[in-house]
């Protein structure tokens, strides 16, 4: 996600203020050791997330695209897109690099499950009626993300903050403390419109947890 924020508008080529990114400059950008970066770079090339062409590096638009949605290639027309904010992604990456990068990875691991209208981690991501959104309980989300203990997952999510605000919040569902819904801060990830966010206030009560 961090690398994608450097892709050109509508072109997809990775570039910085001082020109087009090469593999060497990309390694410096992400701040990895040479060995780790070589492994990482090979994996994203093999997975076709990026591709090299005529000395430039291009981002696969099915993973990350900057530009007007109408300009996305024909093969991506049926895909749903979630907004990411470049400045936010970059600032969070700088804050949670090194040993804490795995915690940051959890935030992006929930992307496929974020409801496009209300930013709730849910089973039905395309539901536009707030009363029909089906939140994924934390204990089920743990299994989905491959965690063993829901308390460890919650602690990891709680530890990540942006501008002193949690990136992920946990809320009671209809006043039932046994059921919690997980909501992603729209300053970090957001797919819907401003009016959609009003719904989460009506049906959720913030959990009183000093660690959140």
Image: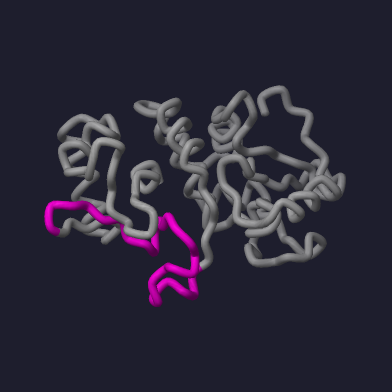
Estimate the x, y position of residue 141 in percent, counting from the top left: 59, 50
Count of numbered tags: 0
Query: Residue 11 colored magenta?
Result: no
Image side of residue 129 versus residue 146, left or right: right
Estimate the x, y position of residue 35 in percent, counting from the top left: 16, 35
Quarter of the image for residue 193 reads bottom right
Q: Of residues 169 and 4, which is closer to you in this image?
A: 4
Image side of residue 79 versus residue 75, left or right: right
| Residue drawn at (60%, 36%) of the image | 167
| Residue drawn at (41%, 57%) of the image | 65
| Residue drawn at (56%, 41%) of the image | 188
Image side of residue 133 versus residue 50, left or right: right
Estimate the x, y position of residue 20 in percent, counting from the top left: 22, 45
Q: Of residues 168 and 137, which is closer to you in this image?
A: 168
Quarter of the image for residue 53 reads bottom left
Estimate the x, y position of residue 89 in percent, counting from the top left: 47, 38
Magenta stretch? 54-79
Indicate whether 149 appears above or below 121: above
Q: Of residues 53 and 99, which is closer to you in this image?
A: 53
User: In the displayed image of the protein, which residue is found farthest to the left?
Assistant: 54
| Residue drawn at (42%, 68%) of the image | 72
Q: Of residues 12 and 115, which is closer to you in this image?
A: 12
Colour option used? one colour
Query: Residue 57 colored magenta?
Result: yes
Dominant secondary structure of the residues highlighted in magenta in the image: loop
Quadrant where the image shows the C terminus: top right
């Amino acid at each position: 996600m961090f690398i994608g924020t450097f892709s050109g508008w509508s072109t997809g080529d990775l570039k910085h203020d001082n020109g087009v990114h090469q593999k060497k400059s990309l390694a410096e950008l992400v701040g990895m050791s040479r060995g780790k970066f070589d492994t990482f770079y090979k994996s994203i090339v093999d997975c076709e997330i990026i591709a090299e062409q005529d000395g430039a590096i291009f981002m696969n638009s099915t993973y990350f695209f900057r530009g007007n949605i109408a300009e996305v290639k024909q093969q991506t027309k049926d895909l749903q897109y979630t907004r990411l904010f470049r400045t936010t992604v970059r600032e969070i990456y700088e804050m949670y690099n090194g040993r804490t990068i795995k915690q940051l990875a959890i935030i992006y691991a929930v992307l496929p499950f974020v409801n496009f209208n209300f930013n709730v981690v849910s089973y039905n991501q395309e539901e536009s009626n707030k009363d029909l959104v089906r939140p994924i309980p934390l204990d089920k989300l743990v299994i989905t993300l491959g965690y063993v203990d829901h308390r460890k997952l919650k602690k990891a999510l709680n530890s990540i903050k942006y501008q002193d605000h949690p990136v992920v919040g946990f809320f009671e569902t209809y006043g039932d403390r046994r059921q919690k819904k997980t909501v992603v801060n729209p300053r970090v990830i957001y797919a819907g419109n401003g009016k959609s966010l009003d719904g989460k206030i009506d049906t959720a009560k913030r959990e009183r947890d000093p660690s959140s």
